[in-house]
Image (cartoon, rainbow, N blue to C red):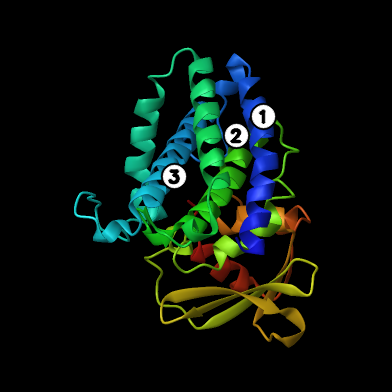
Amino acid sequence: MNQNLNQILGQLNHFSPKLIERINNLTESEWTTQSRCEDWTVKEVIYHLTSALTMYFHVIDTAQKAGDIRDNPNINYMEPGIVDGKSNAGPLSKRTKEASKNFKPNSKLASEFESASGRLTRAFNSCEDRHWNLTAYHPVNWVSVGRMLLWTLFESAIHSWDVLNAIDNEYIVDENLAPLLPQYFCDPLLNRWFINPDLPDITSKNITVNFGESEGLLISSKKRGLTIEKCQLQLTDSDAVINSTYSEFALLITGRKNLNISIDESLTELDGVQSDIDTFTRWFTGS
C-alpha cells in the first residue's frame, strides 16, 4: 500500500466514527434543516451519502472477489463515463428525495449510515497490496479500488460539510481531510464529475492555487477542457493566483461557494483581475 493511500485510509478511520457519532445525535429539527447542498435537507444528504458508501462497498467487494470485472461475463455494468455532476443532478435529487422518505423514524437512517460506513471502512482496511489496483466500477469511469478510496474521501469530506455546516456555520471542511483532496481534484479519471461539460469556448488561461505551501495547484483551460495538476509555486507562471486554504478551496471547486463571496469574506485572496474570477466561477458546477 503506497504512502498516500495509507494516509487517506488513516484519516478516514479517524474521521468516520466522529461523523457517525454526530449523525446519531442529530435532533429532529436538525434532520429537517436545509443543508448546504442545494435542494436537499440534512436527511436527504445523509441518505445520499449512505447510498454512495453502500455502492462503494459492493464495488470493492466485487473487485476483490472477481479480479478484473470487465473480463467476467457474469457481471454486467452500464458503460461508465456517460454521466457527470451537471447532467445527473436533477434525476439524482429526485430519487434521493423520494427514497429518503422511507426511513422513519430518522434514527433508522442514522443506523443505516453507521452500518454502511462501518462495512466500507472494514473493506478498505482488509485490502491487501494486490487489491488496490484491481479494476473497480463507478458511473463516472472505470477506476481502481485505490481510486474508490479517493472517492470515499471526497464524498465524506464534502457531504459532511453539507450537513454539519447547515447546523453549525462555524464548521469547515475537516482540516485533516481537506489537504488530501487535491489528489482527487488532480485525477482525470475522477474529476470530470464536477467539471462543467458545457463550457463555452474560452480563452486559454492558467490559474494557480496557493495553499501557503511550496506546492499548489495549476488549473489550465485549453480547447474547452480543463486540466488540474500539482505544481511547484516558485516555478509556475499563471494569469492569476487564488490564495486560499484547503478547506475553503474544497467549497470553491465544488461550486458550494462563490469565489467573489469568499473574497468578500476575506477567506480567499485573488492576485488577478475580475475576468479571472468570472472564469474560475464558470469552470465548476459542483457535485
Mark linked to residue 167: 1
| Relative to 281, residue 45 above or below | above
Mark linked to residue 163: 2
Q: CA distance from mark 3 to mark 1?
A: 27 Å
Going from N to C along the chain, the mark reached first, 3 or 1, is: 3
Quarter residue 104 falls in: top left
Residue 256 as seen in the image, left or right of residue 231: left
Q: Position of residue 26 (x, y in %)?
A: 63, 21
Q: CA distance from mark 2 to mark 3?
A: 20 Å
Name the image quarter holding the N terminus.
Answer: bottom right
- The kind of residue tagged 2 is Val
Q: Residue at x 71, y 45 (%)?
A: 174
Q: Position of residue 126 (x, y in %)?
A: 54, 45
Q: Nearer the viewer, residue 80 or 136?
A: 136
Mark linked to residue 56: 3
Q: Position of residue 61 (x, y in %)?
A: 41, 44
